[in-house]
Image (cartoon, grey):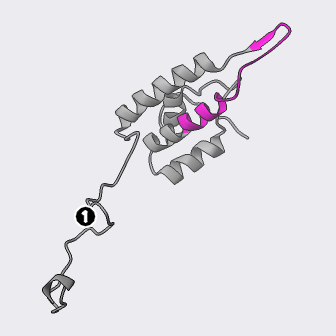
Amino acid sequence: MTFTWLGTLATDLDKVRFHLGDTSSDGYWLPDETITALIASEGSVGGAVIAGLKYILTQLSRPDFRADWLQVSNAEARKGYEMLLSEKRREFGVAAISATVTHVYRADSLATAESDYSDGAVSVDDE
C-alpha cells in the first residue's frame, strides 16, 4: 500500500487527502489505491471525501478499551470526524439522507393513480 502527499493540491488524490486531513505518512487512514478507487467509484473529489470520512468513522466505531496502563478511546476522535463529515457534506452539496416520495391514490393500497373504468366495467353498486 502506498502513500503520496505532495501538498500542491494539483491532483484529485492530493485534494481528497487534504479534505480528509489524511496527510501524514506516519499514520494515514487510506492508501493511495483506495482513494483512487473512491474517486473513480464516487465520480468526484467530494464524493470520495464523503466516502473516505464514512470509512474512517467505521474504524473509529470500534469499542474503547483499557488494559493496565494502556487506554484507547475512539469516542472523541469519532465526534471530530462526525463534525467534519457534516461540514464536508455541506461544502460539497451532498445530502445526508435522500428519499423518493410517491403519493398513493388510496391509503389502503399502493395504487399511485386513480382507477380507470372507461372500458365499460360495471361495478357491483350499479347492478
Q: Amino acid at mark 1?
A: Arg
Residue 92 within the magenta-colored segment of the rendering: no
Q: Is residue 33 left or right of residue 46?
A: right
Between 16 and 6, which is closer to the camera in this rendering? 16
Q: Is residue 79 visible?
A: yes
Count the numbered circles shown: 1
Q: Classify mark 1: residues with Cα within 10 Å, few (<14), some (14-19) or many (20+).
A: few
Between 96 and 101, which is closer to the camera in this rendering? 101
Image-quadrant location for residue 88: top left
Residue under the point 59% across and 42% down: 35
Q: Percent position (x, y) of residue 122? A: 18, 89
From what the image shows, is residue 118 above or below residue 43?
A: below
Q: Is residue 89 left or right of residue 118?
A: right
* Magenta stretch bounds: 52-71
Q: Percent position (x, y) of residue 71? A: 76, 12
Residue 60 within the magenta-colored segment of the rendering: yes
Residue under the point 21% across and 84% down: 124
- State the quadrant of the N terminus: top right
Residue under the point 46% across and 44% down: 47
Q: Mark 1 — residue?
A: 106
- State the quadrant of the C terminus: bottom left
Q: Percent position (x, y) of residue 27? A: 69, 25
Q: Is residue 11 visible?
A: no
Give the SS element for disc 1: loop
Residue under the point 37% across and 41% down: 95
